[in-house]
Image (cartoon, helix red, strand yellow):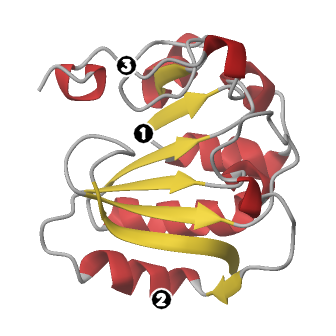
Amino acid sequence: MLDLSGIVSDSIVDGPGIRVSIFCQGCPHHCPGCHNPETWDFGCGTQMEEERLLEIVMSNPLCRGVTFSGGEPFAQPEGFAKLARLLKEKGYEVASYSGYTFEQLLAGTPGQKELLRLIDVLIDGPFVAEQKSLELSFRGSKNQRILDVPASLQAGRAVLKTSPRWAGEF
């Protein structure tokens, strides 16, 4: 069961193509300038089963990717890992935003490590208002990275996602 603040069933701003964006409720980071401060409080969102979320995603025939956002998805790692597993079984690309860095998640809780293993793309790092840029694709500040998670896990270090679709080149 996940605690959610909302779902956007046809997002074009949280990754390439038409995606379903799932916004979790609860965030420990409280980044100054956050564009979703209403998601900071824990335990006050809408409770939803992972299987129901899969049904919602599958109801959009144009969607081939799903993005976890927030709040902080890695604050609910077990539920998001279950959802990521269900999505991957159906062939969806799974991306996640996180205020944690890849390195922090790699050293994180068992649940965080499991969720990390199940996603394809990680946009990592806190939003830093002083580094805000409207020219970045799928990121809010220059310190945030778009990472190829399978390649990063294999290399044991952060590997940038360089495909043109994630670089915003088309």
Q: Which mark is residue 81?
A: none
- Secondary structure type for disc 2: helix
Amino acid type indicated by mark 1: Asp
Instruction: Answer few, some or many: residues within 10 Å of disc 1's Cα (few below 14, many 20 plus, some between 14 and 19).
Output: some
User: Residue 152 at what x, y percent from top left?
Assistant: 52, 19
Q: CA distance from mark 1 to mark 2?
A: 22 Å
Instruction: Answer few, some or many: residues within 10 Å of disc 2's Cα (few below 14, many 20 plus, some between 14 and 19).
Output: few
Does label 1 or label 2 sit earlier along the sequence?
2
Disc nearest the viewer among 3 and 1: 3
Kindly identify which residue carries mark 1.
120
User: Residue 115 at what x, y percent from top left?
Assistant: 63, 50
Kindly identify which residue carries mark 2.
52
Residue at x 60% of width, y 87% of height: 49
Does label 2 or label 3 sit earlier along the sequence?
2
Q: Quadrant of residue 65?
A: bottom left
- In this view, the residue in front, 41 or 90, is 41
Residue at x 30% of width, y 14% of height: 162
- Secondary structure type for disc 1: loop
**Horizontal arrangement in the rendering, residue 24 relative to residue 11 (left or right):** right
Is disc 2 in contact with disc 3, using a CB cutoff of under 8 Å? no
**Horizontal arrangement in the rendering, residue 76 relative to residue 55 (left or right):** right
For residue 148, above or below residue 26: above
Q: CA distance from mark 2 to mark 3?
A: 30 Å
Q: CA distance from mark 3 to mark 1?
A: 10 Å
Q: Which mark is residue 161?
A: 3
